[in-house]
Amino acid sequence: MKLIDDWKKCHRLYSQRINAVGMALCSTYGFMYDSIRDVLPPKYLALLVAVVFLAGFGLRLVKQGSEDGDAENAA
């Protein structure tokens, strides 16, 4: 397995940020208030998380950062 160039800056990539949102949705659903869980039932949460992770896959295909490989402007 080979890491991507500038792997230490991966937290700045769009794909990593969207995957973090998906992980946050998955891990915090049980702790949400009942009123929020009533609005967002588990089947819709599963659909939302699937869309978020698919967006992460798609964003991984998009060039992120400047021409010299610097991901600083990818925010």
Image: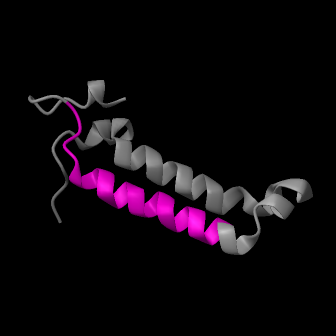
For the stretch drawn in magenta, the main secondary structure is helix
Residue 33 in view in this figure: no
Colour mapping: one colour
Residue 43 appears left or right of 67: right
Q: For the C terminus, which image quadrant? A: top left
> In the image as oriented, which residue stretches furthest toward the top?
73
- Tell me: residue 48, above or below residue 73: below
Residue 16: x percent and y percent?
A: 39, 48
The residue at 82%/55% (across/down) is 32
User: Residue 42: where, in percent of width, then height?
Assistant: 73, 72
Residue 47 is one of the magenta-drawn residues: yes
Which residue lies at the image location 31% right of the left edge and 51% below the top edge?
Answer: 59
Could you say which is closer to the camera, residue 31 or residue 9? Answer: 31
Q: Is residue 73 magenta?
A: no
Question: Magenta residues, as a range?
Answer: 45-65
Vertical comparison of 54 with 3: above or below = below
Name the spot of residue 68 as percent of width and height, x first. Answer: 9, 29
Quadrant of the image containing the N terminus: bottom left
The residue sitting at the right extreme is: 34
Residue 65 placement: quadrant: top left
Q: Residue at x 36, y 35 (%)?
A: 12
Closer to the camera in the image, 48 or 71: 48
The answer to whether 26 appears left or right of 37 in the picture is left
* Horizontal relation, residue 42 to residue 10: left or right: right
